[in-house]
Amino acid sequence: RHQGNCGSCWAFASVGSLESRIKIAEKLPNLPVDLSEQYVLSCLSHAGSCYGGSGLRALQYILNETEIGNNCNGIIPENCMPYQANHDINCSEKCANWTENLIPITAVFSFQPDGSDDDRQKIKAFIMEQGPIATHIAGTKQFSLWGLDHHEPDDYFPEPLFNSFTNHL
């Protein structure tokens, strides 16, 4: 979905994977599940903002029943707090009966791969058995700078280039 002028890809990734996992769990592929990314931006702001964030933290805070998780386990539908591409929208702007619309979750899993073939197989198996996952790349400043000029399908960030960047820091 279009994020507007807001770097909320992390929220869309986590909420999108959650929407799909709900459809799979309910065995209803056509279930019209549309959850609120704005709720994550506005009410679970410790997860991130329009300047970036963590999909994992977003899911952890959706589950969290303390203040950091808006004192409840769950997320609300999009129609209760539509996306506005703005992290300055106050959490109080959600629909009046938002607690009646909460969709709770039961668990959050995370996996820190090391890049091995075994890890890749574990990720593939998890997707096949459980459904979609949200993921991210933790890129360095050097990687970001390199990416400004490299857009071809066969471009890659070579290890020697990475080492030459880090050796000059």
Image: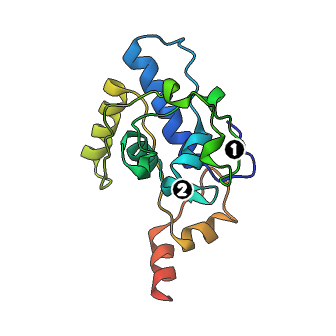
Task: Judge whether 130 appears above or below 69 on screen.
Answer: above
Q: Is residue 116 left or right of residue 14?
A: left
Q: Amino acid at mark 1?
A: Gln
Residue 3, label in figure = 1
Q: Nearer the viewer, residue 139 or 2?
A: 2
Instruction: Please give the residue where the numbered disc 2 appears in the rendered image.
Output: 48
SS under mark 2? strand
Q: Tell me how far mark 1 sits from mark 2, CA to CA.
A: 14 Å
Q: Position of residue 88 (x, y in %)?
A: 68, 55
Residue 139 placement (x, y as % from top left): 51, 64
Q: Position of residue 112 (x, y in %)?
A: 31, 52
Classify mark 1: residues with Cα within 10 Å, few (<14), some (14-19) or many (20+): some
Q: Residue at 70% across / 50% down in the picture?
A: 86
Q: Residue at x 33, y 39 (%)?
A: 108
Query: In the image, residue 98 lies at what x, y percent?
Result: 55, 30
Looking at the rendered structure, the kind of residue marked 2 is Gly
Sequence-first disc among 1 and 2 = 1
